[in-house]
Amino acid sequence: MSNIYKAFEKKKAFITYIAVGDPDLDTSEQIIRAIAEAGADLIELGIPFSDPTAEGPVILESTQRALQAGTTTDKVFDLVKKLRRDIETPMVFMTYANVVFSYGSERFISMCQKVGIDGLILPDIPYEEKAEFEQYCKQYDVDLISLIAPTSSNRVAMIAKEAKGFIYIVSSLGVTGTRSEINTDIDSIVSVIRENTDVPCAVGFGISDPKQAIEMAEASDGAIVGSAIVKIIAKEKEKAVTPVYEYVKEMAEAVHSI
């Protein structure tokens, strides 16, 4: 069974995202450790890429800061290897097809297995084009995470049937970023998913406070938060470790209270 299932085993999952290398790799290491300690059930690690099409300004700027700090794919792999010595929390990479292609798809995915990455999210790869990555993910036991968006409508069942690890439900149209309210009919998307698979699903894009996190986790199996954490890092830079820990702790406790 995939290590990712541990995140959802006994409770609703609280999932976090950070861009690795923002503001620098040392601070990222401390932030990731703090996130794990604060109770996150799964951690998405963003490998910075120069043209991240699914991202809003907050995450776009964080990936630019990470690139300016000299973050490379190899440095991210090295950091994960180091973290895996004492952190058992499931971890997945979120990045773009170009990052994997330029590294070499098989080489990249085999490295994921080697360092202890449990899954891979590639938001710019549509369901119909996942085969090249999927073959290596199966070979090296890395879950290729499927995304389902409000526009997926008649494709939800098809995507759900082949899903691995967990399903990332995109709450809103457009790019990542915090939103004051989320109006997508998550319940109907989840009911189609449930009819087709027992793979857990979690909702991301736009969640920033405990109330939203609880609402989304009640409708699914978990809540995903990225931009709200990245905003703290942007503001506090090297001093972000404690405020990120406090924010994640509050959010995780809210989700785990359901």
Image (cartoon, rainbow, N blue to C red):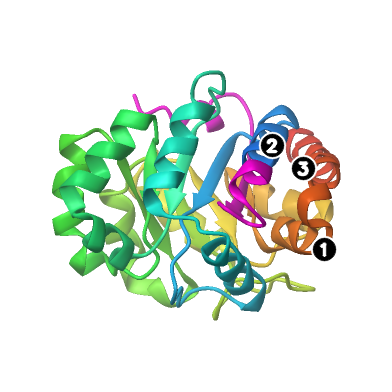
Q: Is residue 237 left or right of residue 91?
A: right
Could you tell whether 78 is left or right of 143 in the image?
right
Query: Would you name the residue on which mark 3 appears?
Result: 248
User: Spatial distance from mark 3 to mark 2, Cα to Cα?
Assistant: 14 Å
The amino acid type found where label 3 is placed reads: Val
Residue 166 shows up from this direction: no
Q: Name the quarter where the N terminus is drawn.
A: top left
Point out residue 246 in the picture as x, y percentages from the top left corner. 85, 41
* Upstream in sequence: badge 2 or badge 1: 2
**The quarter of the displayed image where residue 156 is located:** bottom left
Residue that badge 1 annotates: 235
Quarter of image, res 146: bottom left
Where residue 54 sits in the image (x, y, percent)? 48, 74
Depth order, front residue of 102/206 = 102
Left/right placement of residue 136 relative to residue 206 reads: left
The range drawn in magenta is 1-28
